[in-house]
Amino acid sequence: MISYFFRLLGSVIFISWVVGTLVFFLIHLVPGDPVAVMLGDWASPADETALREQLGLHLPISTQYWNYITGVFQLDLGESLFFHQPVSELIAERFPMTLQLALMALIIAALVSFPLGLWAALRAGKWPDHLSMTVSLIGVSIPNFWLGPMLILLFSLGLAWLPVSGAEQPFSWVLPAVTLGTALAAILARMLRASLLEVLHEDYIRTAQAKGLPARLVYGKHALLNALLPVVTILGLQLGTLLGGAVITEVVFDWPGLGQLLVESIQRRDYPVVQGCILVISVAYITINALTELAYGWLDPRIRVAK
Amino acid sequence: MLKYFSYSVVIVWLLMAFAGFFIGDHANEVVLSQFLSPPSTQTLLSSQVLGADELGRPVLERLILGAQTSLFVALGVVFFSAIIGTTIGIYSGYMGGLTDKIITKIIDVFLAFPGLLLAIALAAILGPGIENVVFALVVVGWVGYARLARAQTLSIRHREHILAARSLGVSTPLMLFRHVLPLILAPLGVEATFGIAGAVISEAGLSFLGLGVQPPDASWGSMIKEGTRYLLMAPHLVLAPGIALMLVVLAVNLIGDQWRDYLDVKSRSSRSK
């Protein structure tokens, strides 16, 4: 288990390094001169020189790369061109909001999908199955940037139950979390159904039924626990995806998280912040995926033994 | 029932995209007297049937141009990512050894990146525009095909006919495209179908964020974005493109589901049980 952990840690560090390198080269992909693009058409040559020196773009590329990578390890992600504030500070302010939103969405998704998937699997081929699978297919197909405005129209503007946007009011997290969690709930429900159906055909379930265990124990303990394994993997992988999906949801609801900062910084051409946001979201995503793998090994003894 | 529904939606989508060629600049004409006019039955046979947007442009025509955009992006993205991903995947799976190890590592790195975020980053850096959207989504999208093609190739590379072809001295490219590819085409087709749905949503998402198609060109995503400003006064501006988008994605996903079930012998036998 310990060597497994260290190998996982090694792969997290390796992939984070690759991602960091890609993010570094991102700014060099800007068509034309990045400094001219950032400052716009009205900049004087003196301004351009000053910014180039501030960003270190006048240095040879190997020195730039070295400075960037050593900076990242010291949590120095440069300074925002717009806020004139260290990028790491900006991100530290916003990141907890994104994480909160993603976790709320995850909880909502789990609460909705588990009963839905269970119901569908236990009534496979009958109307509850068709109903919940149709609902979940619609859930997968609704883009969150449309679901969001629709929920605002219904619950905020129509019924006036919940705030339209922002994060100041007590229940302002509800609509963004539902918006973000819907697709995940749909995916999880489908996964759980498929996984349960597979497990329900296993011999040990028939054995459990044959020896007269109550249905609660057969389904709740023997079937559900085993069926949950693949679902946990998906859950972990999807938490990472939620961080990416949060970008759009945050824009829809004006939620002051990392995604909104990213999109605003793209519009302001504040490239140091753009680089920082992408790096942080990616590394968070990679870390969550690794943790999922660890959890998977912990839940399923077979994997621990195999490693 | 569902089958007819999904194929009809896709056919309507294709027809709309085709109709886009005949509309041209009329959809971009500003008619301020029609400002936010709602859909009405009195205009049933005119282009105003779905109302007009904040510049008085007919929503129906914008919707048709949006269909063209989404179809163009979806086909472009799936075409290029399938070709690139499949080629890399079958090559990697067929060659094995160090080549396979290196390519697998590259695939892992791409999979470790949140896809949408990478597309946002690329679209942001390259600047808005439909070609850049396609490029960004291909950079993200090829990995799925590569992984699938590699896995499928691994499962068939020891078949007799491949061994026979190899002993006859068939060159690698011919081997891959003549003897390996036809056998693994079906699952790749299913992946491509889901890829179309994914590309349609991603294009709309990027356009929603202002990173995709630029005004005055229409995209369902940018229509939703512009419509949210008039949500209370003119909900049809958000409803029309949103419903179109949802129906297309739903239909394509349904078709993908049907094809997958059809190909999946295991699920077919369990259903007949």
Image (tube, rainbow, N blue to C red):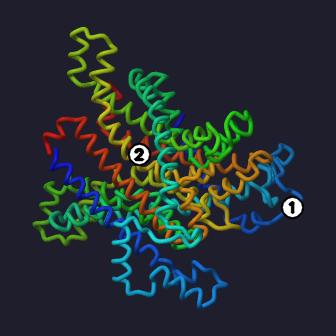
Q: Residue furthest left?
A: B167
Left or right of A180, for residue A205: left
Q: Residue at x 32, y 32 (%)?
A: A228
Q: Secondary structure at mark 2?
A: helix
Pointer 1: what residue?
B32
Residue nearest the observer in this picture, A134 or B103: B103
> Measured along the vertical axis of the image, is residue A50 above or below residue B171?
below
Does residue B129 appear in this view?
A: no
Location of residue A107 in the rendering, given as x and y in whole percent from the top left corner: 46, 35
Q: Quadrant of the C terminus of chain B?
A: top left
Q: Is residue A192 left or right of residue A50?
A: left
In the picture, measured across the screen, residue A282 lies left or right of residue B87, that is right
Q: Where's the N terminus of chain B, which quadrant?
A: top right
- Kind of residue indicated by mark 2: Gln
Name of the residue lying farthest toward the right: B33
Question: Which disc is residue A238 wearing?
Answer: 2
Labels 1, 2: front one = 2
Q: CA distance from mark 1 to mark 2?
A: 45 Å
Say what amino acid the circle numbered 1 marks: Leu
The residue furthest top is A212
At x 35%, y 37%, the residue is A231
* Subunit that carries the residue with mark 1: B
Q: Mark 2, residues whose alpha carbon is within 10 Å: few (<14), some, or many (≥20)?
A: many
Judging from the image, what secondary structure is the residue with disc 1 in?
Answer: helix
**Disc marking residue B195:** none
Asked if badges 1 and 2 are on one and the same chain, I answer no
Q: Position of residue A280 (x, y in %)?
A: 42, 59
Q: Residue at x 50, y 81 (%)?
A: A54
